Image: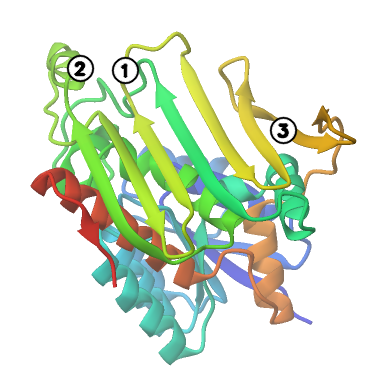
Amino acid sequence: MAKLKAGVIGLGMGSNHLRGYLTHPDVEVVAVADRLETKRAMARDEFHIPHIYEEGADMIAKEKLDLISVAVPNRSHHDLTIAALRSGANVLCEKPMAMNAEEAREMLDTAKACGKKLGINFSYRFSAQSMAMKALVDAGKLGEIYYARSVWLRRRGIPGLGKGGFNTEGAAGVWFFDKKFSGGGPLIDLGVHRLDLALWLMGYPEAEYVMGSTYCKLAPEIVRKSGDKYSVEDLACAMIKFKNGATLELDASWACNIAEREQMSTRLLGEKGGLYQENLNEGYTFTVDYYQELGDRQFDCRLHEADAPKSSYYLFADAVKNGTDFLVRPEEGVTVMKLLDAIYRSAATGMPVKLS
């Protein structure tokens, strides 16, 4: 069987997509696109990619590819993904899926109409700890999950800060806190990961209503000192009530007065047991604890060793190659966007948002 021909649009986060595909024995990365010359030079000099473009749309139009990664500012996810799907490629899109649920639904509908796979890179599912948690949940070790809390807070961690202004998308990191390019701040950037992880572990229950708040208390002054402008929230929080009676609390911030440099956690409470995942040493490695009652006594259990799964990029290529399901369904990406939209709408109106 011939190797899958892959392309990557955007070589910021997309550099991880590129490296991930290169680990797969049945994938050949033949094209990349990025608006920064430094990124194009990296692809040429370090990875020897044969076809290099400035514009992703040009790459889609001129190359015949089996799979394409879209890893650009949020505003371009919709248009590039749809163009790639219509070109005959399967697409792995970075999170968030789109700027809003309407765009996400159009992407899903296009994938179905074209008969192509559309994956969303909710990368925090693809860890040994998350997989172990899911296995326990699926084995019934928690029983009915009635409460969850998922958090990603930074003391000071505004992405792209101090990289200067730009005239075109992706020319600098400030697009993260420019609402017309990002769609929002830490909620759509960090909270999207913790929201998907909690929903996935809970089995993606159907939401009934959402109550959300957003704040912008610290970031404007922080950003002013760097000479940039800031147009999104710096903290968001929400409560999601599900039709099965369960509740999920969600917090996300780029700047807040906490002890840790970076704090990530997801807690699940069930009638038979509980799970808690948190980051270690304020970094990007995690631990998982399981709590249960045995013989009228309370016991704690910690995950010590587990085989790390293949990366999301490798597994998406596998799904394309073998015609199998990818771990993240595009319908879940649409659901996440609906919830993010509802949180922002609730924050703007000060009222709960009822979901159909």
Query: Of helix, strand and loop, which one carries label 3?
Result: strand
Query: Can you tell which quarter of the image residue 138 is in?
Result: bottom right
> Which residue extends farthest front?
296
Q: Which residue is mark 3?
A: 288
Query: Of helix, strand and loop, which one carries label 2?
Result: loop
Q: Nearer the viewer, residue 244 or 253?
A: 244
- Do the CB atoms of the residues marked 2 and 1 lie less than 8 Å apart? yes
Q: Image check: 191 left or right of 180?
A: right
Instruction: Tell me the quarter of the image containing the C terminus.
Output: bottom left
Q: Which residue is mark 2?
A: 218
CA gap, disc 2 and disc 1: 7 Å
The residue under label 3 is which amino acid type?
Answer: Val
Residue 334 in the image: x percent, y percent? 38, 67
Instruction: Tell me the quarter of the image containing the N terminus.
Output: bottom right
Query: Can you tell which quarter of the image residue 3 is in?
Result: bottom right
Query: Can you tell which quarter of the image residue 29 is in?
Result: bottom right
The residue under label 2 is which amino acid type?
Answer: Leu
Q: Image check: 7 left or right of 2?
A: left
The residue under label 1 is which amino acid type?
Answer: Cys
Q: Return the disc, 3 or 1, that comes first in the chain's sequence.
A: 1
Residue 169 in the image: x percent, y percent? 23, 48
Residue drawn where x is 38% and y is 54% of the image:
241
Q: State the mark number for residue 256.
A: 1
Above or below — where is 256 with respect to 16?
Answer: above
CA gap, disc 2 and disc 3: 32 Å
